[in-house]
Amino acid sequence: MFLLLTVVSLTLGLVTMTASVPLAMTLIGLSTFIGGGFQMVALKVGSYAFPREQAAMMTGIASGSWSLVNFLLLRAIGPWTGWMNGGNWEAIFWLIALLPAIGVAVWYALSWSDKAATTPSIARL
């Protein structure tokens, strides 16, 4: 599911390539919907990694982390770098479109090493 959401999230980068306002608004709306999908799927996957008694704590940590990342990203493309004042809209849209792909790649890499450490190999048997 993460891979499907990642592929669809890349459409946000196409917003700067169109002169059509309805198409641009559709792509932005789609990316907003996909952002929510990432949150829900991540919470569902995370709910299996924690005991049921810790579900509320895990949800709070995830929501706080999401908010922190959004704050840092908005500061990074705004006051800290001046991208918004400089009108670097294409770079901003592509950065936001590519970040989910980077996040999913890191998540898969970390999950892969975790699975390799817990799965017995033929050589160890």
Image (cartoon, rainbow, N blue to C red):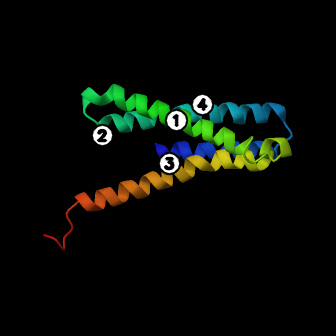
For mark 3, does the 10 Å Cα neighbourhood hold few (<14), some (14 to 19), or many (20 or more) residues?
few
Up/down of 43 relative to 114, above or below: above
Residue 25 percent across, percent down from the top left: 75, 31
Three-letter amino acid code at the position of disc 2: Ala
As drawn, the label of residue 49 is 2
Task: Say which residue appears at 74% left-offset and 41% top-offset.
Answer: 78
Q: Earlier in the sequence, mark 3 or mark 4?
A: 3
Three-letter amino acid code at the position of disc 4: Phe
Task: Say which residue appears at 70% left-offset and 49% top-offset.
Answer: 94
The one of 18 and 116 positioned closer to us in this rendering: 116
Count the labels in the image: 4
As drawn, the label of residue 66 is 1
Q: Which quadrant of the structure image shows residue 70? A: top right
- Judge whether residue 40 can be spotted in this image: no
The one of 85 and 111 positioned closer to us in this rendering: 85
Distance Cα–Cα, label 4 vs label 1: 15 Å
What residue did someone put label 4 on? Answer: 33
Distance Cα–Cα, label 1 vs label 2: 18 Å
Badge nearest the viewer, 1 or 2: 1
Q: Earlier in the sequence, mark 3 or mark 2?
A: 3
Q: Earlier in the sequence, mark 2 or mark 4?
A: 4
Q: Secondary structure at mark 3?
A: helix
Q: Earlier in the sequence, mark 3 or mark 1?
A: 3
Residue 101 percent across, percent down from the top left: 56, 51
Distance Cα–Cα, label 3 vs label 1: 19 Å
Residue 122 percent across, percent down from the top left: 19, 70
Up/down of 122 relative to 108, above or below: below
Quadrant where the image shows the C terminus: bottom left
As drawn, the label of residue 3 is 3
Q: Secondary structure at mark 1?
A: helix
Badge nearest the viewer, 3 or 1: 1
